[in-house]
Image (cartoon, grey):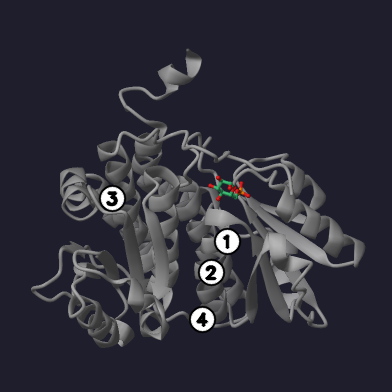
Amino acid sequence: DASDIEKGTYPHYMLKEVDEQPGVIRKIISEYQDANNELKIDEDILKAMNDADRLYIVACGTSYHAGLVGKQFIEQWAKVPVEVHVASEFSYNMPLLSEKPLFVFISQSGETADSRSVLVQVKEMGHKALTITNVQGSTLSREADYTLLLHAGPEIAVASTKAYTAQLAVLSILSAVTAKSKGIELGFDFLQELAIAANAIETLCDDKEEMEKIAREFLSTTRNAFFIGRAVDYYVGLEGSLKLKEISYIQAEGFAGGELKHGTIALIENGTPVIALATQAHVNLSIRGNVQEVAARGANPCIISMEGLQTEEDRYVLPAVHETLAPLVAVIPLQLIAYYAALHRDCDVDKPRNLAKSVTVE
Ligand code: G6P
């Protein structure tokens, strides 16, 4: 059928979409550049960012995980406080709102009912909303005051890959441009670093054989797996664990490295795979301490570190990129490892059981 043609030579949409990521980042850079190659964001959106005393990011699934990373960009660079909320819980655990909130809805499809119901609710309360979506003219885009597009092209595989990295790229651009408008110096060439991250993603996409080996080595027979990280690596681990459970049905959980000992470490048995991320210098020693704790209980650790932070025990070393942009790069092996784990288990990669690409019921 027609959809098979679009897959080209790829066996699955997911693999095709993983491979599209460097191109998507480059496309986003060009879409958000003006004639002088300066990054630009719509003036109204910049004004809304500058007027807000706090951002409330609302999203579901992978988009929620992108929001967690986005919080770091916005707070570190643009110095605006950010809360990140799961859409389906927002009304029940409603936060006490600041005086001048700006709501940011992150949604690949722009159609997720849980997110939409929060949008309707906050609009009724008279608040402003920005939607970050891949789909122009989608419900969440039409009903919000402002839209930023992901420019990732259609994402067909149920498990989101390129939309996630696109969300991170757009959130980073929004943060960098807002910082600039406030006269805040980032202290590095953001645009250049984002381009370097796109190149690093490409390098990783070219190293699929190694990802397949890692999947075979750590995940071919296991019933469960853990992802640990500290700081922003924790959030990337959450996304890695979601990818793995969505398509391979391996019970996977992401944990903050330091929280493991407060309960979850009880689940570690002989051979339990623990995928540990080490891309952040300030937590490099402490995450390695957590790896030792689980290894001492028999776990099979797979450390994925960033060039410059690696030790001999690491299973995979990511090309060096600016530390704050590391999530864009660190997620790639996790996507690919999940893909190959699902293949080994004969799972339907593009259409996993019980899941829908876009959930339009609450
Ligand atoms: C569904 C999909 C997930 C996705 C989530 C949010 O559950 O299976 O992959 O992350 O919806 O979708 P959205 O389109 O709002 O980003």
Q: Earlier in the sequence, mark 1 or mark 4?
A: 1
Q: For the residue labelled by badge 2, is the local secondary structure a helix, a strand or a loop?
A: helix
Answer few, some or many: residues within 10 Å of disc 1's Cα (few below 14, many 20 plus, some between 14 and 19).
many
**Element marked by disc 3:** helix
User: Label 1, label 4: how many angstroms apart (C-alpha)?
Assistant: 19 Å
Nearest to N terminus: mark 3 or mark 4: 4
- Do the residues under discs 4 and 2 have CB atoms within 8 angstroms? no
Mark 2 or 3, closer to the camera: 3
Q: N-terminal of the two: label 4 or label 2?
A: 2
Residue bearing mark 4: 76
Query: Percent x, y for residue 173?
Result: 53, 63
Circles 1 and 2: CB atoms closer than 8 Å: yes
Q: How far apart are marks 3 and 1 (CA)?
A: 21 Å
Amino acid type of the residue that numbered disc 4 sits on in the rendered structure: Gln
CA neighbours of label 3 inside 10 A, class few (<14), some (14 to 19), many (20+): many
Residue 270: give x, y in percent of width and height: 19, 68
- The residue at 36%/51% (across/down) is 250
Q: Which of marks 2 and 3 is nearer the N terminus?
A: 2
Amino acid carrying label 2: it is Leu
Q: Position of residue 336 (x, y in %)?
A: 30, 47
* Number of the label disc, if any, that sits on residue 233: none
The one nearer the camera, 299 or 321, is 299
Give the residue number, with chain letter if any, for mark 1: 64
Give 131 or 227, whichever is nearer the viewer. Answer: 227
In the drawing, what numbered circle is on residue 68? 2
The foreground one among 207 and 342 is 342
Q: Can residue 4 be seen in this view?
A: yes
Residue that badge 3 annotates: 337
